[in-house]
Image (cartoon, helix red, strand yellow):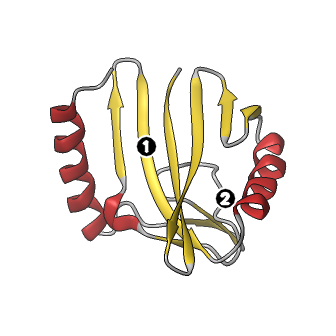
Amino acid sequence: MISFKVLLIASRFALVFSSLGVLSTNSHGNERFISGFDDLPLMRGMTETTESNVAFDTVHGRVLVSFAQSSESEEKILAFYKESLSQLGWKINRDGEFLRDEEILKIEFLPDGDYLAIRFSLEPR
């Protein structure tokens, strides 16, 4: 398990990099991708919030945490990612959790006023 101190240091680096624009949303053609992820699409109508993103490598693999918000329902967002991620080689483990190679991707939801905050986290299995 990653220690709190390592996560705190990594999140500080991520804040510095995001303020410099290093962790900005990727774009390929008309499709936008979530910061730090090579192939995690940003759902249309979703807004990424990069100020809390975390990205670093460990001896066991990479750790990424990115956030977005949307006015869409949790069900609609999960349906979008189930379809999109299955086309990118991800297998559904359970709702909001996907597996590919030696990585696990989790999509979690938190109420945020009129919006839904979405947390995308990637870590080694």
Residue at screen point 70% across, 61% down: 74
Question: Image quadrant of residue 118?
Answer: bottom right
Horizontal arrangement in the rendering, residue 11 relative to residue 93 (left or right): left
Tell me the SS state at disc 1: strand
Say the numbered circle drawn on residue 64.
1
- Crowding around mark 2 (Cα neighbors within 10 Å: few <14, some 14 to 19, many 20+) is many
Question: Image quadrant of residue 19?
Answer: bottom left
Q: Is residue 76 above or below residue 60?
A: below
Residue at screen point 43% across, 66% down: 24
Horizontal arrangement in the rendering, residue 48 relative to residue 77 (left or right): left
- Amino acid type assigned to the residue bearing label 1 in the image: Leu
Q: Position of residue 124 (x, y in %)?
A: 49, 24
Horizontal arrangement in the rendering, residue 10 relative to residue 73 (left or right): left
Residue on which disc 2 sits: 41
Q: Choose the circle earlier in sequence order: 1 or 2.
A: 2
Residue at screen point 43% across, 48% down: 65
Marks 1/2: CA–CA distance: 15 Å
Q: Position of residue 32 (x, y in %)?
A: 63, 67
Q: Is residue 12 above or below residue 70?
A: above
**Quadrant that contains the N terminus:** top left
